[in-house]
Image (cartoon, grey):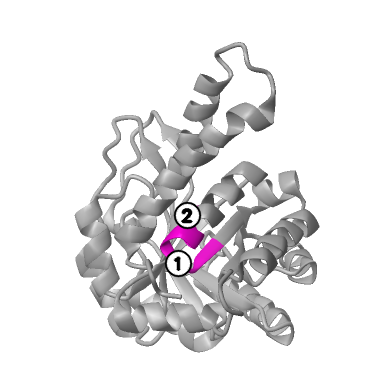
């Protein structure tokens, strides 16, 4: 067992920003994926963020997700934090806060900047009372966390405007900021996702110095771009699709035989997800950061 957690999530994000590494954010929709992430984090002594989108949290249950993460945190002593990913309404974000989430992501990226700021302020005002971190978002990130048969093209007009990012941070005082620098949710069927626009990322960081940046759509992103992004202030990277693929492909193989007892065939599924998480932890540089 590790020693008692001595640093909160904000502390880890700030530390990652200063030292040019990132805390991995891994989404779950079941116990098996959560267990795989915990095993990887314990093996590599890494802080991790567990994410549930609105859809994932409705499937698991907000209270149940918080209880599961809390039980693993108590058992292992690991700095494991729970985040509501892409929360779109204040009402649902409030429910996540009350359930015990450590952080919430308010996604107002489809809104006009003024409305995005207005709503983000309300989220911050509510969450701060409960000592819950808030992630904002400027620049809509396309796609969904699945295999994408269609081509998603990212133009410069889709990217986060550095000036707007600066205004948003100044007005809302969120703890971290998700930005669009060319990634999207999901993985192309070809397995090749577009490059990160490192020039735009650099411009954004100049406008929001001292604020940890969040990269969504990390699955399938070229490794060299991930490494470059770490040097430019990205300190939180989201992974979902690669975990879903590992789970689904392993499960299909596991149930193809005669075995019908889940606790006998699920360990192999968990091990395969764990391998993906371990690779990401090493890539993000969060190994041995506890």
Question: Which labelled disc corresponds to residue 275?
Answer: none
Question: Compared with residue 97, is residue 187 higher up or lower down, i.e. above or below?
Answer: above
- Label 1 Cα crowd, 10 Å radius (few <14 / some 14-19 / many 20+): many
Would you name the residue on which mark 2 appears?
Answer: 40
- Label 2 Cα crowd, 10 Å radius (few <14 / some 14-19 / many 20+): many
Question: Compared with residue 260, is residue 3 higher up or lower down, i.e. above or below?
Answer: below
Residue at figure coordinates x 66%, y 45% from the top left: 31
| Earlier sequence position, callout 2 versus callout 1 | 2
Question: Which labelled disc corresponds to residue 46?
Answer: 1
User: Is label 2 in contact with label 1 (beta carbons under 8 Å)?
Assistant: yes
Magenta region:
40-49
- From where the camera sits, is residue 145 visible? no
Nearest the eye: 217 or 273: 273
Nearest the eye: 33 or 100: 33
**Element type where label 1 sits in the image:** loop
As for residue 105 lying within the magenta part, the answer is: no
The answer to whether residue 142 is left or right of residue 56 is: left
Outermost residue on the top side: it is 258
The answer to whether residue 124 is left or right of residue 179 is: right
- From where the camera sits, is residue 288 visible? yes
Nearest the eye: 1 or 287: 1
Residue at figure coordinates x 55%, y 14% from the top left: 256
The answer to whether residue 210 is left or right of residue 283 is: right
Question: Compared with residue 288, is residue 278 higher up or lower down, i.e. above or below?
Answer: above
């Amino acid at each position: 067992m590790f020693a008692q957690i001595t640093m909160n999530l904000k502390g880890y994000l700030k530390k990652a920003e200063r030292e040019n590494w990132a805390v991995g954010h891994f989404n779950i929709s079941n116990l098996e994926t959560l267990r795989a992430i915990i095993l990887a984090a314990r093996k590599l002594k890494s802080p991790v963020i567990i994410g549930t989108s609105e859809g994932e949290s409705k499937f698991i249950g907000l209270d149940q997700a918080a209880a599961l993460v809390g039980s693993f945190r108590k058992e292992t002593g690991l700095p494991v934090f729970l985040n509501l990913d892409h929360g779109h309404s204040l009402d649902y974000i409030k429910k996540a806060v009350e359930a015990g989430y450590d952080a919430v992501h308010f996604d107002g990226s489809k809104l006009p900047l003024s409305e995005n700021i207005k709503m983000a302020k309300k989220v911050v005002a509510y969450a701060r009372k409960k000592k819950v971190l808030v992630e904002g978002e400027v620049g809509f990130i396309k796609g969904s966390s699945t295999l994408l048969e269609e081509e998603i093209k990212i133009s410069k007009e889709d990217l986060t405007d550095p000036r707007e990012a600066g205004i948003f941070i100044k007005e809302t005082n969120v703890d971290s900021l998700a930005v669009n620098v060319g990634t999207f949710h999901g993985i192309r069927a070809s397995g090749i996702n577009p490059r990160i626009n490192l020039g735009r990322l650099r411009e954004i960081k100049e406008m929001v110095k001292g604020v940890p940046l969040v990269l969504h759509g990390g699955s399938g992103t070229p490794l060299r771009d991930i490494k470059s992004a770490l040097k430019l202030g990205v300190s939180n990277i989201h992974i979902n699709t690669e975990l879903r693929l590992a789970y689904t492909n392993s499960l299909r193989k596991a149930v193809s035989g005669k075995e019908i007892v889940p606790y006998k065939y699920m360990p192999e599924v968990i091990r395969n997800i764990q391998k993906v998480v371990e690779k990401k932890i090493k890539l993000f540089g969060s190994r041995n950061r506890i």
